[in-house]
Image (spheres, rainbow, N blue to C red):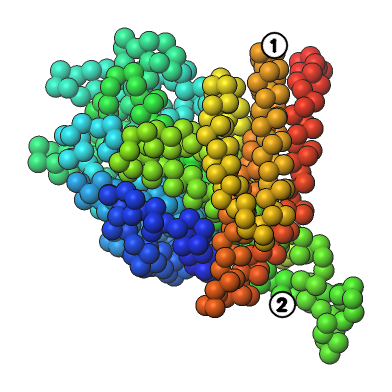
Amino acid sequence: MAAYRAPLKDIQFLLNNVFAVERLFASMPDTAEVTDDLISAIVEEAGKIAEGLLSPINQSGDREGCHFSDGVVTTPKGFKEAYTAYAQGGWAGLTGDVNYGGQGMPKMLSALIEEMAFAANSSFALYTILNTGATLTLSQHGSEELKQRYLPKMYAGTWSGTMCLTEPHAGTDLGMIKTKAAPNNEGSYQLSGTKIFITAGEHDLTENIIHFVLAKLPDAPAGARGISLFLVPKFLLDESGDLSGERNKVSCGSIEHKMGIKASATCVMNFDSAIGYLVGEPNQGLSHMFTMMNYERLSMGLQGNGLADSSYQIASAYAKERVQGRAASGALQPDQNADPILVHPDVRRMLLTIRANVLAGRALSLYAASQLDISRFHPDESIRFRAQQLVALLIPVQKAYCTDRGFEACVLGQQVLGGHGYVAEWGLEQNVRDARIAQIYEGANGVQALDLIGRKTVRCGGELLKILLSEMDEFLVSQEGVESMQPYLSVFNRCRQRLLESTETVIARAAENPDEIGAASYAYMELMGLTLYCFMWQRILTAAFAEQTLASSDSGYTDGLIKTGQFFMDRLLPRAESLVAEIASGADSMMSMKAEQF
């Protein structure tokens, strides 16, 4: 198995040449001190951690898995030591509120760190991102008292966080949850109920675990409008904010036996009159939790990108060394029995498909993260609001499209290795298993697609899409005089127009038949994802052509980028035509069969 290597060159090119992050951060007072030098130092150190600390315990953690005995969960060998080192390095509080011990770094920076962590060890990365999401929710919605008592230790990594949403009977439809919260006289609440699929619900990595739990108050309205959010610690605190030693009435009933991410504890959590504290306003829990969900869904897309990159590294190294058959144009290694399999067009098809999608997916993730940063840090309220609208549109696509392409990349990488890809030692079969969950959790991809076309497009008359199209149009105008970009821009403009026309078609049909929304949803998400990948490749190509004109440029690297972008345009983008046709076919053939005919 090829050792994981952090893709620092690709990362630096995107940050500096494509997104010009130093200029972006300089435009916002709270991020003005985040310079290129600081970014480089942090990314390089994170790369070393991914390579040297997380990757070495990835396969061993998968083989060992988590252990469960009498409510106690023990993580695989090396995980506790790795988490301690991670926490002591200050990584748990990287994006946290500086007023409570966080470092206030932007999401664009932490997104790249998350991707590397997922590539090196997806199970380990899950423990870290849950804490990040929990602290974000608390910092934005919690009372000052709760923030003072919990955030510093969570940013320090000595305590960790979870989110507890799903119940045995209530997954996507959270309005059906049964967990109850009864008020106590002293201002706290007693929570009772069962939550399932709780990542990091119980483990031995930190001295306390802080659960963020959705529950209903006694007088709550029915459905999703009656959900509140509560903070429920594993161990209660004393008046000074230290651990009291008293265990709260929350326990792990079991852990799941899973296809992948086996070193991540996926728990059934039981709350038996556990003490909890209201976070934010009563009956606003779902909206408060969505603060966390946008960031977590971005992280799932990053998991897809990371595992795709890991698979590419293994497969490309293998293809350069494995000799089988001869090149169609004649032997390239006549002194050997065969040529490396990289000479075969189909192997190149698979590798280029992975690389083209990894680069575009990473760029799309950075684009979405930049909008999260603008919505959080920009001093202009109108610009913050516009960024929030873009985030609402981008996140469902980034989560679903990146995880679909990520799983596909792991399977393609496995195919490059053939039989060696199916056995454990090379790591590809683990990547396939670990990547599969990213398409399911934090909102299954079909739900993301329905959210995109339903709430984010049809119900608002395409207003959010107009903001994205205006971003695309600004880019097109900026490149009108750039001769090298003209062939690519015309293709991009046609793709943009197809997305607009398909949107208008669905909106018009949905007025007569609401099933048109769901029938078009997945193809529409794929079309928007493909269009966004095309947009990202326009930006990458623009930067690559500009870099080539500099005397200091690495011409081999930029030429590789341009050729990969050309492959995307020639071989991957044409699928947009079939997606347009699929959307145009309407709902009839999908909805006409009766239930008993299935």
* Disc nearer the start of the sequence (2/1): 2
**Relative vertical location of residue 585 with respect to residue 225 in this rendering, above or below:** below
Classify mark 1: helix, strand or loop.
loop
Q: Position of residue 187 (x, y in %)?
A: 17, 22
Q: Position of residue 588 (x, y in %)?
A: 79, 18
Q: Is residue 471 left or right of residue 150?
A: right
Please indicate, yes or no, whether residue 1 appears anywhere in the rendered image.
no
Residue 508 or 188: which is nearer the viewer?
Answer: 508
Classify mark 2: helix, strand or loop.
helix
Q: Which residue is mark 1?
A: 512
Which residue sits at x=33%, y=65%?
Answer: 38
Which residue sits at x=65%, y=48%?
Answer: 534
**Relative vertical location of residue 239 with respect to residue 331 in this rendering, above or below:** above
Quadrant in the picture for the C terminus: top right
Q: Position of residue 115 (x, y in %)?
A: 49, 55
**Relative vertical location of residue 521 with respect to residue 71 in this rendering, above or below:** above
Q: Which residue is mark 2?
A: 321
Q: Is residue 594 left or right of residue 130?
A: right
Distance from the alpha carbon under mark 2 to that under mark 1: 58 Å
Q: Position of residue 13 (x, y in %)?
A: 51, 64
Residue 61 or 518: which is nearer the viewer?
Answer: 518
